[in-house]
Image (spheres, helix red, strand yellow):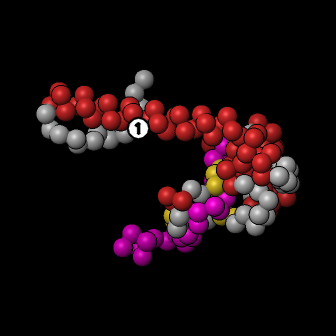
Amino acid sequence: MYFEDSSSTWYAARSGDVVFSSIDLWKGCVSVVPPEFDRALVTKEFPIYEITDDRLDPVFLSSLLRSRYYQRAFRAITTGHSNRRRTQVGDFEDLEIAFPEERDAQAALIAGLVQARTGQREASELMSRAMVTFNDAIDGRGDEALPDVDAE
């Protein structure tokens, strides 16, 4: 019902596609769509690209596009003022993606990142479970999860 009344056009992103925020690309808002977000809907503000080169590992590409080198490139092609700076699709498409042709070499370059992300996810899950246990001990309401908040 929400989408029927929307004035926006919606596009389905597929697992393995590259999606970026045309407003926030310069801040690192670019990713390869993970399987759990297959068929996620986005507006035209989030261009979608299919990876067509089988030599390119999507996990490597996701890391590469967040690298310091590409973040500098994205800042250079972004126009506008303050928080509404945009990257035009044509400028993004003009960028060349350089990568090792061997997937093994790509995997070796990102091994530390992949390990760190796995550790981060595991720590986040452990923290969530510990918070539910703590909440249950405090209020006795069972395993009801609280809204996600940043706790520092």
Please name the residue that numbered disc 1 is placed on: 125
Which residue is most to the front?
104
Residue 107 vs residue 34, the one in the foreground: 107
Where is residue 93? Give x, y as percent.
Answer: 80, 60
Range of the magenta residues?
1-29
Image height check: is 40 above or below 21?
Answer: below
Which residue is most to the bottom?
4
> Which residue is drawn at the image coordinates 76% and 67% (left, top)?
52
Query: Identity of the amino acid at label 1?
Result: Glu
Residue 20 is inside the magenta segment:
yes
Residue 112 vs residue 14, the one in the foreground: 112
> Which residue is drawn at the image coordinates 17% and 40% (left, top)?
142
Residue 146 is inside the magenta segment:
no
Q: Quadrant of residue 48?
A: bottom right
Where is residue 95? Give x, y as percent.
Answer: 84, 54
Which residue is most to the left?
140
Q: Is residue 22 left or right of residue 88?
A: left
Where is residue 103? Give x, y as percent.
Answer: 77, 52
> Which residue is drawn at the image coordinates 65% and 37% (left, top)?
113
Quadrant of the image for the N terminus?
Answer: bottom left
Viewer can see residue 44: yes
Q: Quadrant of residue 72?
A: top right
Query: Magenta-highlighted stretch: main secondary structure?
Result: loop
> Which residue is drawn at the image coordinates 69% and 55% (left, top)?
58
Graded by Cα atoms within 10 Å as few (under 14), some (14 to 19) or many (20 or more), the crowding at tag 1 reads few
